[in-house]
Amino acid sequence: MVELRRFRKSLWLLMTLSAISVAILNSRFLLVDIHTIFHRAIDHLENEKFELFLHLFTAPVLLVGGALLFFDRLPQRFPTVHRWGGRAYILTVLVTSIATLKMSLNETEGPLTVFGFTVLSVLWFVTAALAWLRAVQGRYARHAEWMIRNYALTLTNVTFRAELHLFLWLGADFDLIYEPLRSLQFVPNLLFAELLIQTAFFTSPNWRDLLRADGYRRRRDRQLTSQPVQEFSVQMPPGDSPKP
Ligand code: HEM
């Protein structure tokens, strides 16, 4: 079986490359008239032009920046980059989520879409705020968990499109599924994030400990909170392994 560390690295690479591709694609609004590409967002040009453009500028940066922050060696090898990158990411999410909340409340697509985007904006803000708070408090294990939840929400627009195309491929009617999918778009992402957290996917040294994740997670939390950690970290201290 593929070693867990290698599997984790491959997944991270895949996620980062996908994030970069989507970010490049979304940045085409810098060159092309927005009316011709983001049809579903142009309603916001009239009353929320500033919010829309703020969102369009920050979305690709958050997508790529968030993925890079999950590079597992970053906290240990480049603590300053991790600290300042993390602060910039969280601050940008906090500001952007206020803009998306305003757009969400004025969304014209339909009530379910309004609901989906509004809840997503609030959750995006709250998870970023909690990630920051836990880091400031020195509760790094909790900080890492809130960052996982937050980035899972950042990826919502990407995963929503994948889900939508899967349903269309299965023969579903676009008009029937678009709104219900939009309204619950954050649910699969949060469930997946929770699965990663509860199984200690990011910190288990091997598959065996992943399956005994609960005990492992408690031990790891004790270690992380009992030592004077200088940086936030989703990674175990070097060479660490669960005590028998
Ligand atoms: C009414 C509310 C919103 C509107 C009109 C809107 C509009 C857009 C548009 C036009 C894009 C460019 C790509 C595309 O066409 O999908 C985009 C991308 C993005 N949006 Fe939003 N958005 C809204 C709310 C949100 C919220 C609440 C989040 C919170 C997670 C979010 C996160 C993202 C991200 C991360 C991207 C870049 C990645 C991607 O395109 O998949 N958006 N948004």
Image (spheres, rainbow, N blue to C red):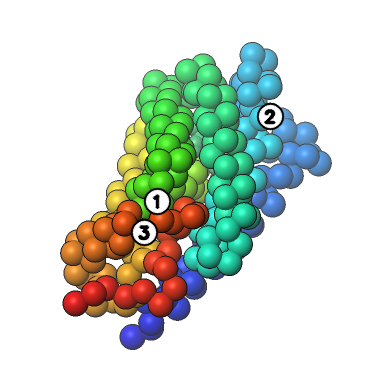
Mark 1 surroundings: few (<14), some (14-19) or many (≥20) residues within 10 A: many
**Front in this rendered view, residue 167 or 108:** 108
Q: How many marks?
A: 3
Residue lying at the far bottom of the rendered structure: 1
Q: Alpha carbon of mark 1 to alpha carbon of mark 2: how far?
A: 33 Å
Q: Position of residue 34 (x, y in %)?
A: 72, 33
Q: Earlier in the sequence, mark 1 or mark 2?
A: 2
Residue 53's disc number = 2
Relative to 30, is 159 above or below?
below
Q: Alpha carbon of mark 3 to alpha carbon of mark 1: how far?
A: 11 Å
Q: Residue at x 67, y 15 (%)?
A: 46
Q: Is mark 1 within 8 Å of ligand 1?
A: no
In the displayed structure image, the side of residue 144 where residue 214 appears, left or right:
left
Is the C terminus in the top left, top right, bottom left or bottom right quadrant? Answer: bottom left
Q: Residue at x 53, y 19 (%)?
A: 102
Residue lying at the far right of the rendered structure: 31
Q: What secondary structure is found at the residue carrying circle 3?
A: loop
Q: Position of residue 157 (x, y in %)?
A: 50, 43
In the displayed structure image, the side of residue 187 where residue 158 appears, left or right:
right
Q: What secondary structure is found at the residue carrying circle 2?
A: helix
Q: Amino acid at mark 2?
A: Phe
Q: Which residue is mark 3?
A: 227
Q: Alpha carbon of mark 3 to alpha carbon of mark 2: how far?
A: 43 Å
In which of the image's four quarters is ligand 1 placed? top right
Are the residues at dot 3 and dot 2 in contact (C-beta closer than 8 Å)? no
**Front in this rendered view, residue 67 or 31:** 67
Residue 235 visible in the shown view: yes
Q: Earlier in the sequence, mark 3 or mark 1?
A: 1
Is the N terminus in the top left, top right, bottom left or bottom right quadrant? Answer: bottom left
Q: Which residue is mark 1?
A: 140
Q: Position of residue 197 (x, y in %)?
A: 31, 56
